[in-house]
Image (cartoon, rainbow, N blue to C red):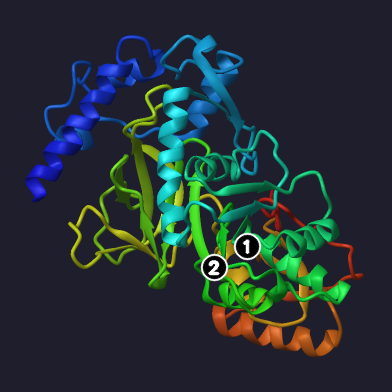
Amino acid sequence: MAESLELKRLAQLNELVGRVAETNTFWRGKLIEADALSGFRSLEHFQSRMPFTTKSELSTDQETHPPFGTFYTYPFDSYTRYHQTSGTSGRPLIWLDDAESWQWVLDNWKPTWRAAGAKSGDSALFAFSFGPFIGFWAAFDSASQMGIQTIPAGGMGTVDRVRFILARKPTYLCCTPTYALRLVDIAEELGLDLGEAQVSCIVVGGEPGGSVPEIRRRIEAGWKTARVLDHHGMTEVGPLSYGDPDNPGLVRLVHDPFICEVVDPETDEPVAPGETGELILTTLGRYACPLIRYRTRDLIKPVAVPGEPPEHFALEGGILGRTDDMVVVRGVNLYPSAVDAVVRSVAGIKEYQVDIDTTGTLTQVALRVDIEENSEMVCNALSEKLRDAFHMRFDLIPVEPGSLPVFEMKAKRWNIKSN
């Protein structure tokens, strides 16, 4: 079984090499470096010789060779889809797909719909603005191909979206975890019951949260009839995972279209099951805009799945954090998702921002919090939970209600001041 899977992966990998080696300038250079211009002899050859690729390399390539860079395989007039990364960690990266590669992306989203139980004749509402960020675009197009009625809800404010959802009563809702909670807050302010929408499942993505028990519990409590299904992907790699409907703490990878590796971000050595490492991806079918041994910066804990080969691992707890998001404060590793889980476990907090100052002798962490009522009681409860979770003190600063930013897509809550 293991040998046949390895041979299949090797064949897929060499098909990719054959597609890109002649015309893709960026990847041709890397394949020459790996002595693999005509293909890899084995997966061991691939993993020992093929260098990693980083997002900064791709960004530099686009800046040096504007507007799109040199990592595309075909003439630019054959590309039909334009997207950009969100730009949360630097300059947005432009990403193009031709029809074949975009179909590959859509096919990789369909397992998420199947995990949600979606079928032809159901309906799905997409609570996001349809801009260049890939967001739920692939979810929208793949749902349409599956016979699911797609309901766009861009171009409207949150109040209008709440009323629209209650009027349309979609089977499924797609949004970020943050926005699912935001819709709950607005419905409560309007005196409306989101349970009346009878949404069956909320597919969340764009940020960690769907696999965090406390956040999932709060979303499901606010929507009443809906369960939460986590999903994650990246503009550069496409849809990648979906929550296990039978085990909400587990996220399953769509393995067949990828080579998935997990390495220690410091040593680059493979990590054992159950250990935390960085997810490395090779896209095996996105020939128009491939990625080979791409450092996603996503930290995960791979675990074996009963009945599946070891290579088809799942993610315990979903995405645990990002290698570039971690901040070390007095010897404690802080990740946005870990702090978010604690904040969301305290009722009464509508929004928050984290301010980290590393310019002094000791790094200082402060949370500005928008609290509905009973500010002192809520702050005391949050302070205690943060201390128990991280064994350190956080400065809590209540702010004027409604003064903090709210988010429809990826939330940007961390502000880091450094020298």
Q: Position of residue 308 (x, y in %)?
A: 20, 60
Residue in the picture at 82% in, 68% down:
186
Q: Position of residue 350 (x, y in %)?
A: 78, 72
Q: Position of residue 384 (x, y in %)?
A: 66, 87
Three-letter residue code for mark 2:
Val
Q: Is residue 176 above or below residue 375?
A: above
Q: Secondary structure at mark 2?
A: strand
Q: Which residue is mark 2?
A: 228
Label 2 to label 1, Cα distance in Å?
9 Å
Q: Position of residue 361 (x, y in %)?
A: 67, 63
Q: Quadrant of residue 192?
A: bottom right
* Numbered badge on residue 177: 1
2 or 1: mark nearer the eye: 2
The one of 339 and 266 positioned closer to us in this rendering: 339
Q: Is residue 8 above or below residue 171?
A: above
Q: Is residue 8 left or right of residue 114?
A: left
Q: Is residue 262 left or right of residue 342?
A: left
Q: Is residue 39 above or below residue 300?
A: above
* Numbered badge on residue 358: none
The one of 231 and 200 positioned closer to us in this rendering: 200
